[in-house]
Image (cartoon, rainbow, N blue to C red):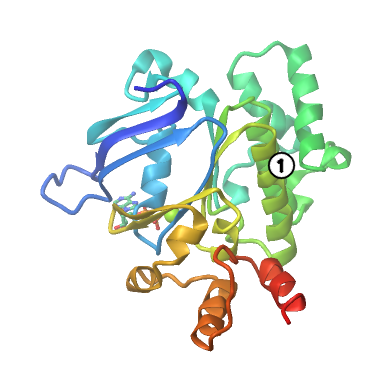
């Protein structure tokens, strides 16, 4: 186990239920996530992404293999809360994550469970709400908020636990484009502040924002590399029912026509930039 890694997954296999002969939801996966890194995990429905995520903070325990979170083995009963505090989880549906009738109580829920001093909890709640631009909603009931606002509150609740790593499991899947953009902006800020980010998504444009993309297929790792590397494997991605980002596809078609498009153009913005200065 290497201390430079926030999370180390050693040969993880996970099967649901007692059926040891059945297909594994996660099948012999080994991965390391360096401290401060930003990784996107891509894969079609049923490829094992959520199962992997839930293994990372001890919500599920490996059938085989070991996971270390900041050096703690997730199977170790004495360190369940050390693992949960370090690796926060944000899920798809914010309604399932909000438990209180008032926003600020919700954000305080996690730190209260950690047994933090009430005075410090108040400071953490203020700061966490600020970091998701929801400070002025602190006295509101969560059910009156939009989906994107609720998701921001859910993120604040995780941030208030001062995790070193946050695992986002399709956090924008239920949001409109505006809500999605706001959540992505917050995720990028958290990464810039030094938090290790794992972003599970099926939006290519979101995955392209990460420094690294891991593609899962049938419980296994299909590709692992920088966005430019991963998106260059068009055929492999298509075979895994995934598309490449529009700008990457366009770059390929332009190259076929003999136009020299530099490697590494992934986002629409980069493509527009390139086209505007093309002569
Ligand atoms: P993803 O998040 O990529 O959509 P999941 O991790 O949810 O994939 O699912 C991986 C596999 O495990 C799928 O075949 C799915 O049907 C199965 N699975 C997921 N959750 C359960 C569960 N609670 N019980 C049994 N099988 C499950
Ligand atoms: Mg899932």
Specify the quadrant of the image occupied by residue 267.
Answer: bottom right
64 to 230, vertically: above or below: above
The quarter of the image that holds ligand 1 is bottom left
Location of the N terminus by quadrant is top left
Write the residue at 75% across / 15% down. 120
Write the residue at 45% across / 36% down. 33
201 to 274, vertically: above or below: above
Q: Residues within 10 Å of mark 1 (few under 14, many from 20)?
A: some
The residue beneath circle 1 is: 189
Location of the C terminus by quadrant is bottom right
Q: Is mark 1 within 8 Å of ligand 2?
A: no
Give the side of residue 275 with respect to residue 259, left or right. right
Write the residue at 73% across / 30% down. 105
Give the side of residue 73 with respect to residue 132, left or right. left
Specify the quadrant of the image occupied by residue 229.
Answer: bottom left
Task: State the image coordinates of residue 60 (x, y, percent, origin top left).
Answer: 35, 36
**Camera-side residue of 6 and 272:** 272
238 to 183, vertically: above or below: below
Write the residue at 41% across / 19% down. 71
Q: Residue furthest bottom?
A: 257
Element type at mark 1 = helix
Task: State the image coordinates of residue 99 (x, y, percent, origin top left).
Answer: 63, 38
Task: State the image coordinates of residue 34 (x, y, percent, origin top left).
Answer: 48, 33
Task: State the image coordinates of residue 219 (x, y, percent, origin top left).
Answer: 29, 53
Give the side of residue 244 with respect to residue 177, left or right. left
């Amino acid at each position: 186990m290497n201390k430079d890694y926030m999370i180390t997954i050693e040969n993880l296999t996970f099967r649901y239920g007692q059926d040891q002969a059945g297909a594994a939801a996660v099948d012999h996966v080994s991965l390391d996530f360096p401290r401060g890194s930003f990784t996107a995990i891509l894969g079609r429905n049923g490829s094992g992404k959520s199962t992997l995520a839930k293994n990372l903070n001890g919500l599920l325990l490996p059938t085989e293999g070991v996971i270390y979170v900041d050096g703690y083995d997730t199977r170790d009963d004495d360190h369940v809360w050390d693992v949960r505090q370090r690796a926060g989880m944000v899920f798809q549906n914010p309604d399932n994550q909000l438990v209180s009738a008032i926003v600020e109580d919700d954000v305080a829920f996690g730190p209260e469970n950690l047994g933090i001093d009430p005075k410090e909890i108040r400071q953490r709640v203020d700061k966490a709400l600020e970091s998701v631009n929801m400070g002025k909603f602190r006295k509101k009931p969560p059910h009156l908020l939009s989906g994107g606002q609720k998701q921001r509150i859910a993120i604040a609740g995780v941030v208030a636990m001062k995790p070193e790593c946050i695992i986002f499991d399709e956090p924008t899947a239920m949001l409109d484009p505006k809500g999605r953009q706001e959540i992505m902006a917050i995720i990028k800020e958290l990464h810039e502040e030094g938090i290790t980010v794992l972003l599970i998504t099926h939006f290519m444009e979101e995955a392209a924002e990460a420094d690294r993309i891991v593609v899962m297929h049938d419980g296994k790792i299909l590709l692992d590399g920088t966005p430019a590397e991963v998106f260059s494997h068009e055929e492999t991605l298509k075979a895994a029912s995934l598309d490449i980002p529009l700008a990457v596809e366009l770059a390929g078609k332009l190259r076929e026509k003999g136009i020299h498009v530099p490697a590494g153009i992934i986002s629409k913005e980069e493509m527009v930039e390139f086209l505007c200065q093309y002569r």
